């Protein structure tokens, strides 16, 4: 069974790390038999009416569990984790739903609204009634980002992976076949729809962050020479809002 666990800890300007790292660390406290498939970052609306630290993003951990009976244990561990790891002064929130939960389609609609509209806690709680949502400090506004993270990730067509296998330890230059053996699909977004060959080399800039497309990790690349490609996107300096 697959679970979507949305976290938003709305970290503060003085935080040593943000929501992404908090979610990635959740892997360390998973019960035996459970595994982290990936962590997907979701970008929400940036608006002066919304308090945010750097980008107003939230993240969703995608967890595989061997049996639904572990759900309560996962919820308990997620609560303990966000309460222990959240920065003092933040407004953390959680949202958890299973892959076959009929409310996921509705959560996806809510998530999309959170990318274009200022949403309130009341709107989220009323519209997402029936799924697990909890706030864990401050104003509890993190529940808005947490619900959005679950809905957008469950759609299978939004966000980028900030954790997938050994994503953060990959070299700056790899072949297409090496990348695909990791379960990451390499797809050209060149206007001429060129197809990357297995032995073609990809400059990853030391920062592979696949997109979530079709419920799979996909690395979009552009041609930069004969049998040579470059992944799109690169690490940016953190900016405060």
Image (cartoon, rainbow, N blue to C red):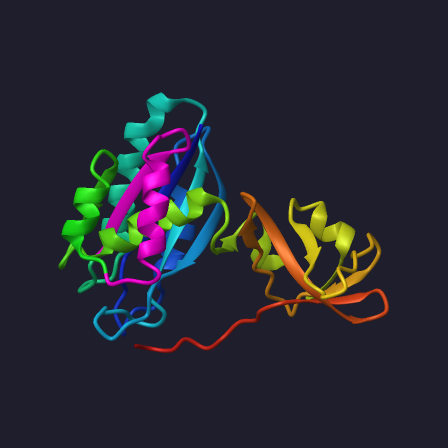
Looking at the picture, how far across and down is residue 49, in whole percent? 21, 72
Q: Position of residue 151 (x, y in %)?
A: 37, 45
Magenta-tinted stretch: 92-118
Could you tell me residue 127's position as x and y percent?
22, 43
Q: Residue at x 18, y 45 (%)?
A: 125
Q: Is residue 136 visible?
A: no
In the picture, which quadrant includes the N terminus?
top left
Count of numbered tags: 0
Using the image as rendered, state which of residue 241 and residue 74 is in the foreground.
Answer: 241
What quarter of the picture does the C terminus occupy? bottom left
| Residue 159 is a magenta residue | no
Q: Nearer the viewer, residue 72 or 40?
A: 40
| Residue 208 vertical placement versus 151 (above, below) | below
Q: Is residue 135 left or right of residue 228?
A: left
Q: Is residue 222 above or below residue 33?
A: below
Left or right: 116 as drawn, with respect to 124? right
Residue sitting at 32 percent across and 43 percent down? 107
Query: In this picture, is 200 found above or below 143?
Result: below
Q: Left or right: 87 with respect to 191?
A: left
Note whether residue 26 is visible.
Answer: yes
Residue 96, horizontal then vertical, whole percent: 31, 39
Q: At 22% from the left edge and 58% from the top edge, which residue is drawn?
A: 119
**In the rendered view, does 235 fall on the left or right side of 195?**
left
Against 94, is 233 above or below? below
Query: What is the quadrant of residue 138 in the picture?
Result: bottom left
The image quarter in which residue 53 lies: bottom left
Q: Residue at x 14, y 50 (%)?
A: 122
């Amino acid at each position: 069974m697959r679970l979507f666990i949305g976290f938003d800890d709305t970290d503060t300007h003085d935080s040593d790390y943000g929501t992404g790292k908090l979610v990635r660390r959740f892997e360390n406290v998973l019960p035996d038999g459970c595994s982290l498939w990936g962590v997907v970052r979701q970008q929400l609306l940036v608006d002066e009416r919304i308090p945010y630290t750097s980008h107003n993003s939230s993240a969703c951990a995608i967890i595989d569990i061997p049996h639904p009976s572990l759900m309560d244990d996962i919820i308990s561990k997620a609560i303990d984790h966000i309460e222990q790891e959240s920065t003092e002064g933040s407004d953390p929130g959680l949202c958890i739903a299973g892959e076959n939960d009929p409310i996921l389609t509705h959560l996806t609609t809510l998530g999309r609204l959170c990318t274009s509209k200022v949403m309130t806690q009341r709107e989220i709680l009323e519209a997402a009634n029936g799924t697990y949502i909890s706030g864990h400090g401050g104003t509890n506004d993190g529940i808005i980002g947490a619900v959005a993270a679950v809905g957008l990730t469950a759609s299978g067509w939004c966000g980028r992976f900030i954790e997938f296998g050994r994503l953060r330890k990959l070299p700056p230059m790899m072949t297409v076949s090496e990348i695909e053996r990791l379960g990451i699909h390499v797809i050209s977004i060149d206007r001429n729809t060129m197809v990357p060959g297995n032995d073609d080399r990809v400059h990853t800039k030391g920062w592979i962050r696949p997109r979530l497309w079709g419920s799979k990790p996909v690395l979009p690349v552009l041609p930069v020479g004969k049998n040579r490609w470059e992944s799109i996107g690169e690490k940016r300096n953190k900016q405060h809002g």
